[in-house]
Amino acid sequence: MLTWILRRILAVVPVLFGVTLAVFSMLFLVPGDPVKMMLAEFVTNPDQVAQMRAQLHLDEPILKQYGRFVTSAVRGDLGTSIRSRRPVTIEIGENLGSTAQLALAAMVVAIGLGIPLGLLAALSRNSWLDVASMGTALLGVSMPSFWLGLLLIFVFSLHLAWFPATGGGDLQHLILPAITLGMIAAAIIARLTRSSMLEVLGQDYVRTARAKGLGGFAVVVRHALKNALIPIITIFGLQFGNLLAGAVIVETVFSRPGLGRLIVGGILNKDFPLVQGVVLFVATIYVVINVLVDVAYAYADPRIRLGR
Amino acid sequence: MRRFQTRLWLTAVLAVVLLTLPGSALPTAEAQGGGTLVLGLDQEPPTLDPHASPSAVTYQIIASVTENLIFKGPDGKLQPWLAESWTTSKDGRSVTFKLRRDVKFHDGTPFNADAVKFNFDRIVDPKFKAGGSRAQLSGYAGSKVLDEFSVQVSFETPYAPFLTYAAAGTLSIVSPKAVKESGDAVHTRPIGTGQFMIKEYVAKDHTTMVRNPDYKRKAPWSDRSGPAQLETVVWKFIPEAGTRVTTLESGETQGVYAVPAQSLPRLEKNTAVRIEKAPWPGVPRIWLLNVTKPPMDDVKVRRAINYAIDKEAFLATVYKGTGLKAISPLTAVMLDDPSLKAAYPFDLAKAKAILGEAGWQPGGDGIRTKGGQRLEIVLNAIEYGGGTDPTAQLIQSLLHEAGIEVKIKAQARPPWYEDNYRCATHGPVMFLRATDPDGVFSLFHSSLVGANFNWSCVKNAKLDQMLEQGRREADPAKRRAIYLSIAQLALDEALTVPLVDELSVWAYRTGVQGIKYNFNAYPILGDATLRK
Amino acid sequence: MTDLVHRLLRHRGALVGLIILGALALMAVGAPWLSPRDPIRTAPRAALQPPGATYWLGSDQLGRDVASRVLHGTRISLTVGLIAVTIAVVIGAPVGLVAGFYGGRLDSFVMRVMDVLLAFPGILLALAIVSVLTPGLTNVMIAVGLSAVPTYARLVRGSVLAARENLYVEAARALGSRDPSILARYILPNVVAPLVVTATLGLGTAILASAALSFLGLGSQPPQPEWGRMLSEGRDYLREAWWISTFPGLGIMLTVLGMNLLGDGLRDVLDPRLKT
């Protein structure tokens, strides 16, 4: 088991390097002079341009710059934001909590709504209940998150005034964004739970259990659900990544502080160091989560780690 | 027993009724002090340091935190503030201020001539990243401390706008000690002498200021002496207009700035809300036309554009109830004249005729052509990250009627500035807050092409001469004549398209009283009270 | 082939999807004739009119006809989705094909590159790409297309690997058949079915992603009547004029719904093993 974990981690290292390379090269793909773009508001003399260029080490050979980029990143230095003049790590630190809160709350909503819905659909297969719940789930998967967010704002903030429409910080600012993000993830999870459950229910060992005379519910809970959960765990990991990405949009809709708004603001402001730093951070987190999910998966299903 | 109970009941009910009746005999809790006022702003200031900010929103907050040598109220008159009196030298090149002796900064250090010198020197220091303040000290030659409470501020040439600028938030006075010692904290905790002190700053959320208990004087706008009435003021940054207005309606805030035009009708009907409008002084919402870039280098094309823009369209949509028709590169409150009003009435037929004269003939797809080239213009607009400024889209649509194709280049501020400096597009739509007509200097003087704000890229010797003259001329009547000529020349050469004189629109809950404004239309909160 | 089409038409979900998409395609193609007004023409004095007789779906903040804009927006969204997916397939499928067929070091390298691209969750990769290019629909199509490449590469590679194991292939090789003909006769048919399903579903994802990027201000430029941008422009008017944001959003949802229904239907019909 341990060797399997180590091998998995080792396999991820080149991917992380690839990620740093991709993020690093972003600055060079900019059409035009990135330094001029970043300074524009305050440029009063060409010396400032040269100064900034030196500050960002853009006059050094590319390989040296890349080396510097990677070694800094490993040491926890993700650069400095041009706009706020603060280290990117501090910007991330201030915003990470809010996004993490949102992602977790959305996950709770997604699982709380999605799994029961999917189970219900699977167990009442092909009935009107199945069709209705899967129909709703299908709508949810087709719906743009920003539209859902605006709809919720319209009803619950502007008209009923139950929840604030913008901002962050406390529970009541979390509810609408979490529902927006979570409902769409719930739809995905519901569909997946249903298909996963149905596949498991059709398996031989379930029929055997039934033949042995075990009641329907016991069969479901003891045997089927446990095995159906395995692909769900995998999706959990993938979904978390999607939730992080979806948070970008939801945070913008609700003007909620977080990594999402940090990135979008950075892009619109041409604050390249900030964008690079945050993208690198999020990608790394995503990779790490995937590794953890794989480990959990392997733990739950020995077939994975014993052979392939 | 029964009767006693009934009487007890009746008494209780009566007492409750009496206590809750408005204007009852019992003294109600008067808003005689205390309370927290929550105000919603539409932007977060890039910095709270008055000398470093290029952005108007800083001064909404600063107006109650720092003070100036001179105060200019909505009536336009200059009044003593931190300076008891001042005299201009005969050659017009220096002003000697006699300062008040009883003023202390929020950090306890004394306000004196050294402090004034420090403040002005700081702004012009090339190592300091000044904002709008630097342009206002153009030609600054230094300040001399004559004695502890007298300071002489000198300029290389006579500089008429100085007294007005000395009353603007950009030249307000901050504590030298704080600047020297607090480093980056000057951006979030400026130390002034005003009736409020900044207590905390939470990025992207709000900033809080508290009453300065040591304020003993009488402020120029006030009838009473002493500290402010309110205990605390919280400035919240709420960029979304819809939600900002909702916070006012729900009571989460008691005042909001920048009420969008579409929400005004609803708020005007709301009896719990009061709207206060004040005209912004300075350069109106204006489209600066880049005179160096074809086809706009042809004055006929620029004049045609002016005739083709129907300003009522803006007043019917984006600026409904929040603006007035602009007539020149200065707002009407700064400069008003019948000749300016008559300049470019909306006349689509005339616009088309002029374009025809200039050789631009109607083309197949509705866009005019000349020698095989289409009449195309690039408008530089700011992308706020969610819908472009509707003003740009209106311009695009209006000019389409005349056969001009407008491409909107929507981008964030930094690259927007870049393009303006390089005269790369056909011009941006912008505005300037300025308390003195000298504000147009930065708009049209040839030395400011490639800097802030000559984005029409104009290099006109006569205009330069008039602008410099306007700076030197001390006599108000002569000054007005000079600026009228400047405005007329700008209109005749069609260097710009003035669009809308914007109004500063604040909405308050009726319990908020006593808000005053300075000439810049920024609210001053020293006398404000809050009734629950 | 005709048998497949018959089965598809009998699948209720797919049928509904086809009807929806058909209607949308009609709207897209017929937009210039179906629109009551010019979608970009402003009418300032008729701004913010609610849906009614004059303006079927209302008018927006500059007096433009929402109905006409929604109709023209169909054209834009469908085009963007198609081009983005085409980019993804045109790059991803050959990559996956080559990696799966030849295996070895090429395969490992290619899959590593795909892993790197997949390390950026969801819309993040598209965001990163758009951040260095200028905002605009073309760049959004490129960004969304590129970020979907790993999906198709992996898919095709998987199908190729599965098909390679097939005995027919071994036999053909033993008989001396050369690579291109093996590819064409045995591998490709295996690849086409899942590819079509994924591409159909991928169209929906691409449309959602590009609308999202436009919503953020990084995609379509004014005065293009693109749905994502219309949604974001309507945000400031939500209270006073809910119709500006609502109808474009409905458009997006219906379009993606149609694609999802069709994609699910195709999957059920083409690969009964996956049917639930």
Image (spheres, grey):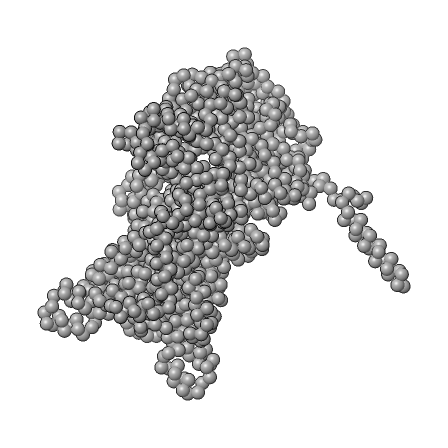
Location of residue B446 in the rendering, given as x and y in whole percent from the top left corner: 39, 22
Residue in the foreground of this view, choosing between B112 and C86: C86
Q: What residue lies at 36% left-to-right and 31% top-to-bottom?
A: B426
Residue in the foreground of this view, choosing between B420 and C25: C25
Can you say whether B42 is above or below A302 in the image? above
Location of residue C205 in the rendering, given as x and y in whole percent from the top left corner: 36, 57
Taking C98 as reference, is A120 left or right? right
Taking B400 as reference, is A116 left or right? right
Location of residue B9 in the rendering, given as x and y in whole percent from the top left corner: 83, 58
Q: What residue lies at 52% left-to-right and 53% top-to-bottom?
A: A153
Can you say whether C153 is above or below A3 in the image? above
Residue found at the far top of this picture = B90
Residue found at the far bottom of this picture = A212
Location of residue C67 in the rendering, given as x and y in whole percent from the top left corner: 43, 49
Q: From this viewpoint, is residue A242 visible?
A: no
Q: What residue lies at 81% left-to-right and 51% top-to-bottom?
A: B15
